[in-house]
Every structure is written in C-alpha cells, then in structure tokens.
C-alpha cells in the first residue's frame, strides 16, 4: 500500500536522460580519454574481434573523444573511412582536434543520436560501440539502428561494464554516493545492466544479429590516494561529475574523505587496486 505522505517517484523521461548524458560528457570531454586509458586491453580485444581491413568503412557509435575511431582510422588506412557519432558536441570537438593532430583525414565526426541514426542502410563494414550501450535509454533501438546501417555480413563489436561486484572502479564511488545522498527522484539505468555475458548476447541477438559471443576482459585501475581515485572517477563519470560540481565545496571535499572508507578493502602495499571487468561482444549481420 502506498503512503500518501511519501514523495512521488517521477517517471523516467528518455529525452531528459539523453540531455543529462549529453551535458555530462560535454563536461568531461577534455579529461575523459586520460581517465579511461586503462580500457586499453578491452579496446585491443575489440579491434582484434573486428579484424579491420584497409579500405573498410567503419562507424563508431558513442565515440566520445574518438578513441576507438582514431585507432580504427589507422587500421583502415587512407582508402578507408571512419565516422564517429555522439550526442556530446564538445566531445566531438576534442575528437576532431585529436584526429587532425594525428593526420587522420579519413576519420570524421558528426553529432548524431544512436537511437535515430541519420545514415543509409547497409553502409558500413564494421560498427563499434565502446562503453555506450548502458547509457542509451533504449539500447534495443540503438542496436536495431546499428544493425540497419551495417552491410550484410558486417560485424558489430561493443563493450560495456561487467557486473557490479566485478567492477569496483565504478561500484566503490556509487557506494559512497548512495551512503552520502538520498536516492534520486528518478532511477537511472544501471551502469551494470549488461554485465553478464549471456544477457549481453541475448540483447544483441534480439536486435537481429547472429553469432553473438560475449567475453569478459579484465582492466587494471590503481590509485595512490582516495582523492586521486575520486578525480579519476569524476573524469569518466559524465552527469555525476556535473551534479557534484554543483554541490558546496565542503561537500565535494568531504566525498574525497568519505570514499576512503569504501576504498579500504582494495588497499594493497600502499596502492588502491580496483581491477575491473568489461564485457566485449561481437556479432554479425546475417
């Protein structure tokens, strides 16, 4: 039975959620790549599974600062083409700047919504989506769009966070925040909602892909101080970083001390070790 004195839970608004995500990743645009350098093993595995060839056309969905897009650009060479898309315009500006500095004229970037791609059917040999699916209000719709723009026989390769208990880099901060602040008025989709390989395979298969196969990839995260960990989390956290930046300075500083409680179990010989799991999936458009 509901309590008439309890605050009403606001309903989830996909459009508002997207705007929050856009704002968040614009906020951390200049810092996101450095904060996520540890993703290297997962990105390497994604590129291995994609088996890119010179001259291929590649789409990188939720490209952010273009980390995967730029690597793919080098793999497909001057005769290939890579398009990175994202809703965060400032992230795309960072991506353009870095691609230009690396001489990657075959890599371009456009602001686009993953759930409504303004791209032709059957136009890409490979599609990547690195750490994006859990940020989409409707990942099923986004995957259907990725399927649509892939050529027959083309391959999708995506990566997401693993299960919460296997991903302390994110979970430690979320535990601290949950202890410090009241529950949000609107529940956000979990960062770990596709963390089980079997579930991710089912999600991808449901969009029409065949031969979906997911695997866990371990990535290392270390920090020497609670404050250092906290900053690295914020630089990768998007909308959470925006929300916390609006808090009083004493609250922001207090969180750096509060997180030490949750980091304590991960202290080994003076270093906090938060090795985490990412799940990488590859599938084919039949």
Image: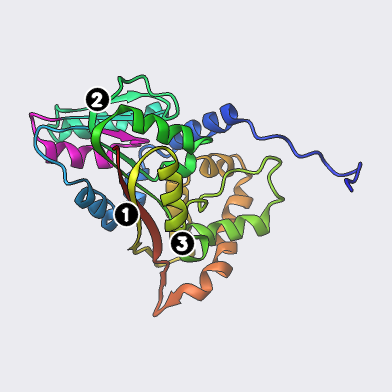
**Residue holding disc 2:** 123
The residue sitting at 46% across, 61% down in the picture is 167
As drawn, 268 above or below 112: below
Assess whether mark 1 and mark 3 are in contact (beta carbons under 8 angstroms). Answer: no
The quarter of the displayed image where residue 278 is located: bottom left
Nearer the N terminus, badge 1 or badge 2? 1
Q: Which mark is residue 167?
A: 3
Within 10 angstroms of label 2, few (less than 14), some, or many (20 or more) residues?
some
Q: Which segment is the magenta one?
A: 59-80
Secondary structure type for disc 3: loop
Q: Secondary structure at mark 1?
A: helix
Q: Residues within 10 Å of mark 1 (few under 14, many from 20)?
A: many
Give how far across and how far down residue 39 sits, in percent.
Answer: 32, 54
Task: Name the residue that disc number 1 marks.
Answer: 39
Q: Which is more toward the observer, 28 or 138?
A: 138
What residue occupies the far right of the structure in this picture? 4
Instruction: Determine which quarter of the picture holds residue 117.
Output: top left
């Amino acid at each position: 039975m509901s309590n008439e004195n309890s605050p009403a839970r606001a309903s989830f608004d996909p459009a508002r959620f997207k705007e929050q995500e856009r704002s968040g990743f614009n906020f951390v645009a200049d810092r996101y790549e450095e904060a996520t350098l540890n993703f290297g093993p997962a990105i390497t595995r994604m590129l291995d599974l994609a088996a890119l060839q010179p001259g291929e056309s590649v789409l990188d969905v939720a490209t952010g600062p273009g980390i995967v897009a730029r690597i793919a650009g080098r793999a497909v060479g001057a005769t290939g083409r890579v398009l990175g898309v994202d809703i965060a315009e400032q992230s795309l500006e960072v991506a353009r700047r870095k691609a230009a500095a690396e001489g990657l004229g075959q890599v371009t970037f456009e602001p686009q919504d993953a759930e409504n791609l303004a791209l032709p059917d059957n136009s890409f040999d490979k599609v990547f989506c690195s750490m994006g699916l859990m940020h989409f209000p409707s990942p099923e719709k986004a995957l259907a769009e990725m399927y649509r723009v892939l050529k027959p026989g083309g391959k999708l390769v995506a990566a997401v966070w693993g299960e919460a208990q296997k991903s302390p880099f994110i979970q430690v901060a979320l535990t601290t925040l949950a202890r410090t602040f009241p529950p949000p008025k609107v529940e956000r989709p979990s960062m770990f909602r596709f963390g089980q390989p079997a579930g991710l395979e089912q999600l991808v298969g449901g969009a029409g892909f065949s031969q979906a196969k997911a695997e866990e990839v371990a990535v290392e995260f270390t920090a020497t101080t609670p404050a250092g960990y906290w900053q690295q989390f914020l630089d990768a956290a998007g909308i959470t970083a925006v929300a916390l930046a609006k808090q009083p300075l004493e609250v922001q500083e207090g969180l750096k001390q509060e997180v030490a409680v949750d980091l304590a179990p991960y202290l080994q010989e003076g270093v906090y070790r938060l090795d985490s799991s990412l799940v990488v999936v590859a599938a084919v458009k039949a």
